[in-house]
Image: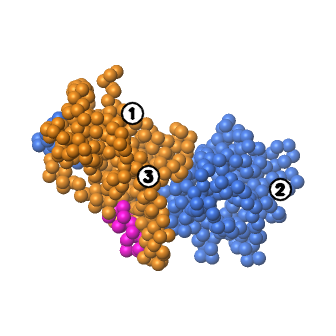
Amino acid sequence: MKNGLAALLIASSLWGYGNGVIYWAPHISHGGEHSHSKHGGHGMGETTMLHAMNLEGNSTVTLIKPDLSKEDLNLTDTALTLPKASIGGYYALVLTHRTDNQVDSAIRYLSQQGRPSKISPTKLTALPKTDLEIVPDPLHREHDHYTASKSYHFVLRLHNHALANTTIFLETRDTPVQTVTTDTDGKFTVTLPNDFKNVQIGRSENKPSEFLLTTQYREGDTLYKTALTMPYSLNPNDYWQSQKYGAGAVFIGFLGGLFLYRRSKKTGVPRG
Amino acid sequence: MDKLLTVTALRRVIQLTAFVFFVYGAMIFTTFYTGDKLTQSLPALSCAYDMKGGDFCTLIPLQHQMDHRVSSIFTQGEKVLPALMGTLITLGTVAVLILILNKAFCGWLCPLGFFQDVFTMIGTKLGLTQLGSLSREAVNKIRPIKWFIFLFLVLILPLLTGIGFLGHEWGNPYCSICPSRIMTTAMGGDMSQVYISQANWGYFTLSLIADLMFGLMVALALFVRQPFCRICPMLPMQTLFKKIGLLRLVKNGDSHCDSCGNCVKACPMDIYEIQDQAENKNITHADCTLCGRCVEFCPHDGVMNFKYGPITILSSSKESFKKRTKIDKWWKE
């Protein structure tokens, strides 16, 4: 009951987007904060409690581990607490909701710490997880994170085959829906918006936001819908880091080197 | 064609291959995650900030371990062994790599070393007067800097940050000033690491040092050999394990060596000690990058040697000296 109320609160306020599509959202504490840690490194910044937004009725939740083994999980209302990770690396959290003529799916990738997996995350992304699936191409490295103002590539697959000429919707909390169309190989690129509010100086002072990629495709009588949600961080170069001044400093350093060259011509010994 | 068959030519080919792998490996070899999977402890400056790279250097995990794990001994009363386990694994990996190639990681594989070599070649071809060996006094003044950087920027400041004495910006201060961070990302088309931070004085200072030093390094490399390598904290890191390295520089001076000083002139790190008399002695100095130039430019048979374990893989000779000197003149024309 308590979790249900929390989900309702989240859906009606901070995370009220997605236009009815089922998607994963991180748990938000009563203080309005994500359950992310301040450190954004490998596994450390990942949330371990999530909510399946817009979910009504029964669904299946599968956790695919870095070694590609699978574990079925149960939701409490719409909330899910991830089990303690034993293997380090990327996990895929897959929710599938089937009705007579519709298949909804929601996917989220999470990096967790533990004994390193010997299997490449490319195997995890290549693995068919649902009928219709938006796949990061590639999924960023475990030490990286999605960042505003940067572009990222994805591929859309239906029954594990690339799906061309299909509209994808990109949404964030503070940016209206943008659309992009997949190319003939099912690939598409999105640039994450710089839409952070009340920015504090210092990366660790700003909580990550969420982006949502959704699409749908009708095949015969069946409508397939899918959503991929991931966290993204603000880009310091949009705020308190100046690339212009940086380039200027590099140039000054270079001039300093040339000055030393002029001096060395007077005192230096030619190389033997 | 025979002109090209030298140790330096072979080294250039290997350096270029290593550069491509360490800077672009993820793109070219479709091994996107090797950077996270290969060693994560490379004893060469291949940067973890380059998301296209094939592997990354050991200094970043060391700083993080000091900041987040080793510090927990003091802040949370963590037991020493669990808190040090990550560091021991990192150092163990470095030890294994050094056992295999010793300090040749610098001279043969480091992307930043190759980057500087390329600029020196450009400077030579542009006709810039190349600075000969630095004076012994200058070398002696420069040498302690790398130890200072290693001890303070790689170990002590991150540890103090983890304990809580310093702000977050000092958690990985070496990476914040490392020219390889700027070089490797820029070579992959990502200029986001060239910046001045206005977050606070600490970030500002570190970012300013990084940019100034990168520009200075590029300009210096046009007429000075290996300018940054002389203060690189990877040298002290490698020195901790160099005794176990199978590859080593051995001098068998005996009566043949007349201390002509050719080896010192050839040495890009200006290691004067290699001209001292030595008989069948491992002379792999803390500053040595095992580039092999001293072996190439030694005019005496069998005096300077590259040995791998008990096997001599390269030995100085009159013939190779003549050939190498001829090539050097041709190159500088």
Front-most of residues A175 and A243: A243
- For the C terminus of chain B, which image quadrant? top left
**As drawn, B180 above or below A163:** below
Return the chain for callout 2: A
Q: Which residue is mark 3?
A: B96
- Identify residue type, mark 2: Arg
- Name the dominant secondary structure of the magenta segment: helix
Q: Amino acid at mark 3?
A: Val
Q: Which quadrant holds residue B172?
A: bottom left
Say which chain tag 3 marks: B
Which chain is assigned orange?
Answer: B
The percent position of residue B95, horizontal first and vertical second, equals 41, 54
Q: The residue tagged with tag 3: helix, strand or loop?
A: helix
Label 1: state its secondary structure.
Answer: helix
Contact, mark 2 vs mark 1 (Cβ under 8 Å) = no
Q: Nearer the viewer, residue B117 or B4?
A: B4
Q: Give the residue type at disc 1.
A: Val
The chain coloured blue is A
Measured from the top left, where is residue B106 in percent x and y?
35, 46
Q: Residues within 10 Å of mark 2 (few under 14, many from 20)?
A: some
Magenta span of residues: B152-169
